[in-house]
Structure formats: structure tokens, C-alpha cells
Image (spheres, helix red, strand yellow):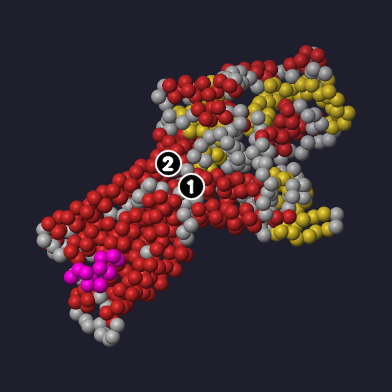
Amino acid sequence: MSQNSHHDHHHQAAPPAGGEVRSNRRKAAKDHAGHDKHAGHSPEMFRDKFWLSLILTVPVVFWAAHIQMIFRYQAPDFPGSLWISPVLGTAVFLYGGLVFLKGAWRELRARLPGMMVLISLAISVAFIFSWVVQLGFVQADAIWWELASLVTIMLLGHWIEMRSISQAQGALQELAKLLPDTATRVSEQGEETVPLSELREGDIVLVRPGESVPADGLVQKGTSDLNEALITGESRPVKKKEGDEVIAASINGEGSLRIEVTGTGEKTKLSGIMRLVADAQTSKSRAQHLADRAARTLTGVAIVAGVLTLVVWQFLGASIDFSIIRVVTVLVIACPHALGLAVPLVVAISTTLGAQNGLLVRDRRGLEEARNLNTVIFDKTGTLTLGEFRVVEMSVAEGESEENMLRIAAGVESESEHPIARGIVKTAVERKLEAPPADGSRAVTGKGVAASVEGVEYHMGGPALLKAENAQVSDTLRKAADAAAGRGQAAIYLLRDSKALAVFAVADAIREESREAIRALHARGIEVAMLTGDAQSVADAVAAELDIDTVFAQVLPGDKAAKVRELQDQGKKVAMVGDGVNDAPALATADIGIAIGAGTDVAVEAGHIVLVRSDPRDIPKIVELSRATYRKMLQNLWWAAGYNIFAIPLAAGVLSAWGILLTPALGAVLMSASTVVVAINAQLLKRAKL
């Protein structure tokens, strides 16, 4: 089944304005970071809060008695100078800390206490304790400078984190920018520049050299090379001529094109791709669920550790301000910040990296499982093969040239609509041979076609034509025809004066990319199987040519899923590669369903991963991306969890006997540093070679 045949079933919504599409997509890029604790936050908000809080924190630190003692200086003393720290410290708490308090409230309402709860506990304990001291209820040292510097450093850490997430989704925003704001619409009245929102299906638009294509469409007039790299991942410009499909946001080369609009707004492939990427970035993998559980566990551990720290230090006779500072440091340093970022950032980057390479991840679990694959099943027609007839072998009579015979055959068949005839004509076109015009073309019922080319009468057809014409066939041509029949291919003869001049073996042509894809999978230790409804002889011929390990021939569409289960029952991790329509049950049954041919319809509903290009060479890339992503997730989880094993006892003061004590601010620095390490490590995934 061709991709185009199911093209319209998934898109029923009326298209919004082009600008609205872009703004929706930008919003999606921010809101779908898979990082719920930052819903509604932006890097700019944290940046602004950080800089203002820093300005307010500097005087608090400068007038802090503890800092003056360490650095041996005397801050100016004037009426009201004692209130600099509490007033500015309170301002920092209310202005900079409010975002954490609101986040904690959301976590508590959702009954999922995590990082925001811990930060809020730490700064609230420090704030309340400092006011209790300031008002003289307890004889101790207030911890205003620790509170202010803690909030400021936390804001810096979150700004860095949000920037990382935004950058990870940069490709989505780049895609959104690709659509032009206006289009040149051509009508009977002439050319007019209109906003994208006014374009409707059936409109004709003019795309000049260097411009972006404003909507999906079909070329009505002109030829040009289009750059579709950001949409399909194909680096080379693609030649487009009359009747070819073009994708919104691809960039026109040196020719002018007139395009009939077939899809605008939400119905464009660009929109579909962005929707899939945004959805994938919010779909949670097993590693994400593991990280979420670990973060919640760590929150509980931190609170228990904080209470124990207070009890133990009070039992040991420490002052209350010392004990409170230890508690605040424990709560700060144990924040599961790095743990919360470890997986979502890798998810965002890997999904974007996949999209840049023509791999759309619909379900994160599919990508996660791909690293364990040991068998890939291909549907034959349209996946390993073109799904169209081509001349795959030819043999010519002595004294004739292959090019000339193919040229004449294409001329004879040029007016026929038969699939085999179209295959012969297309083969000649692909070999850049110009078919001569045919005169008096007529069908010879049940036997083939006859026509006059360059003043000579020719016949073309199969074995029935030979019998009817009582044609002379050389041994060479007969052997070639028998070999083609043995491979399940159609043998078509070209006759002149009842003598066979050539025989063409016509079959569903194998994609050149299929050979490379199967070699690459074998190199990774992955077996390759093939499913087809074709006869065993046809299937075996394709399998032999491509070095396929297992062949399932004469399989009805409804039985494909059973063949997938058969391999799974042998303990194999199976990926199924198909067109996402007649293969839907098999795609759903496989451990990983890979829908191929998304360039013609990105809304393929079956399968975990969609290939934008119909290129089987992209399948090994899925395995590489999966392995690289999993490595980064593990590294980040180990770092984030391992850091806390050492940090919490240190914060509680177990090394205080040796004079090693952490302040809350230093704890915040260490916690932020661990987050930065995780963020940098995740960014290194961008270097992965797929």
C-alpha cells in the first residue's frame, strides 16, 4: 500500500494561522521539556531573578559578622546598619525564593515531594530561624548571609538548567523559524503577498530562488533543487519537478516554482514532525521513572537526615544556630536537582538529535529498547524494495547494445499504463536514455504491445507473444529468460520481424540503500529477517541478493504479527520495519515498531519510531542513538546518586572533628556544581556519531 493512499486520514482539524502554528510550537518546545517542576518557567525569568538577588545579596554578605571575622575587616557602622542584613535577606527570600515556595506547593498538592520541597524547607528554616534570633527570642547568630547566598546560588543553578533544556530543544525552535511569515499567492488577478494564515488548500503559490516553501504542496510548474535537510535529515538538495511533492519550510534553490497547496498550518508535515518531537520529549522512559522514584526517595532521606542531624548535634551539646546551619546544609546539598535533570535533559537532546537525523521518536520506550535488539524484520515491498517495477537484468542479441534496446523498448511501451511497461520506461529515464516517439501503438490482447519506432515495427510481450509470433530466440536469451522466471521475475521480450532482440527481467527493484542497511546491521551483530506475501522463489531471490538470514514468504497481511511472535518466542528482541499501514498489527506486536516512509505522512500511528526518509540505512542509526542515550542516562544517574552518598554525611558535619564544615552556601555551590556536571555530560550526547 502506498504512503499517499493513507495520507489524508490523520489530518482533519482546520488549519490555524501560520504564525499561530509557530507560536504553538514554541510554547510546546518550552512546556514539553519533560521537566514538570519547571512548568511555566523560563531561562529569562531565572536569569532576571538571579541578577537582582545577587545585587541584594552583596550587602548582606558584606555586613555579615561571620564574613567580617573571616576576612578581618570592619563594615561601616551607622544607625540602622544592623537591619541591612535582615531587610535585604527578607527581600531575597520573598523575591528570589518565591519561585521555589510555589514549586514546593505544587509538589505537595500532587503528593510528589521532591527538589522544590527540599529547597523550600532549607530556605524557610533559615528564614524563620534568622528572624527568631533577630527578634531576640533565641541567643544565637542569625544566618542571613547564608540564606541570601543560598537563594542566589539556587537561582543561578536553575538558570543554567533551564538554558540547557532550552538549548536541547533548539532544533524544534529552529524548525518553527523556517516557515516564512508571508507567501506569494498567484491568482487570475496576478501575484499578491498574503500572510500564511490566508493560504488554503488548492491555492497556487510562487516560491522564488532562496525562499522557504510556505506550505506542503505539489509542483505545478518549474524545476529546482530543494534543501530539505532540517525536515528529512537528507543533506543533499533534492531535485523537484512538475508533479513532485514539496514540504513546507524546505528551502528553494536556484529555480522558481509554482506550487499547488495541499496542506497548511497544523496539516503540514513540519507541524506533524514538531508534534511528534514534542510528544516524545514528554513521554517518559523506564530510566525516567527510575530517576523520579530515586528523587522522591532521596527527598525522604534528606528530611530524615536533617531531623537526625538536629537531634544528634543538640544531644552532643552544640549551639542551636550551629545545629540549624547543619540542618539547612543537609537539606540543600541533598536536593535531587542533578537526579531530576539527569534523564529529562538526555531525553530532550536525544529526541532532537534523532529528529535532526530523520528519526522521529514517538515513544521513548521504543528508543530505550533499541539497544537490546538482536533481530530486525523488514517488510519487503516498499521497504527493502521500491514497490515499483524496474528492469533488474537484461540480455541482448549479438550485435545489439543494451542502451539502444532499452531505449527502443521504452519507446514501444511509452503509451502503455501497465505497471511492467511503466517500469521499463522508468528504468530508461533513470539511465538518462531518451525514448523515441512510437507510432500506431496498439495492444495485442493477452500477448503484449506493438508499435512503430523510428520507422520499424516492434512487438513486446512475454512467452505468449513468442508462441503467437513463432519467434526465433537465441540460446543466450532463452537462458536469461529462464533464469528470470526461476527468480520469480517477469521476462519481457523485444521482437523485430519475429526475431527476439532482447529480453528484460522486470521485477520489484531492490533499493540500493537496503544493501548498506543490512551490512550495517550484520556488523552490529543483528540478524535480519524478511516478510513478504510474494512467492517463495521471489523472496529467496531477494534474500540471496541482500544476504538476509531468515525469509517468511507467502505471508498474508493478517499473519505478519504471528511471524513476529514466532521470533519473540525464540527469545529474540525484535524490531519490525514496515510502512505503518498494512503492517500495523506487526509493528504493534514487535518490541520496537519502526514505520518507514514518514516523508509522505508523518502521522503514522503504528510503531515507536518513524523514519522521515524512506531509507533503511537509518535503522542502524536507531540502535546507535539508543546505545549512546542509555550510556548518558546511566552515567548521569550514577553521578547524581553517588554524589549524595558522600555529600549528605559531609553536610551533617561528620568531619567536624577535623575542622571540615560546609556552610549552606558552599553546600548550594556543590549541589549546583553536580547539576552542571550532569548538564554538560548530557550535552556531550550531541557529539554522538549516528
* Magenta span includes 459: no
Query: Callout 1, which amino acid?
Result: Gln
Which region shows up in magenta?
127-139
Image quadrant where residue 253 sits: bottom right
Q: Residue at x 28, y 85 (%)?
A: 79
Task: Pick the quarter of the image with the N terminus.
Answer: top right
Numbered mark located on residue 281 in the image: 1
Say if 572 sits above or below 42 in the image: above
Q: Nearer the viewer, residue 474 or 665?
A: 665
Residue 285 marker: 2
* Residue 527 position within the rendered picture, expressed as x and y whole percent measured from the top left: 45, 28
For the question of whether residue 605 can be seen, the reply is yes
* Image position, residue 319 (x, y; %): 15, 65
Give the distance between the C-alpha atoms of the residues marked 2 and 1, in whole angstroms: 10 Å
Q: Is residue 393 left or right of residue 654?
A: right
- Does the magenta run of residues contain 132? yes
Snapshot quadrant of residue 540: top right
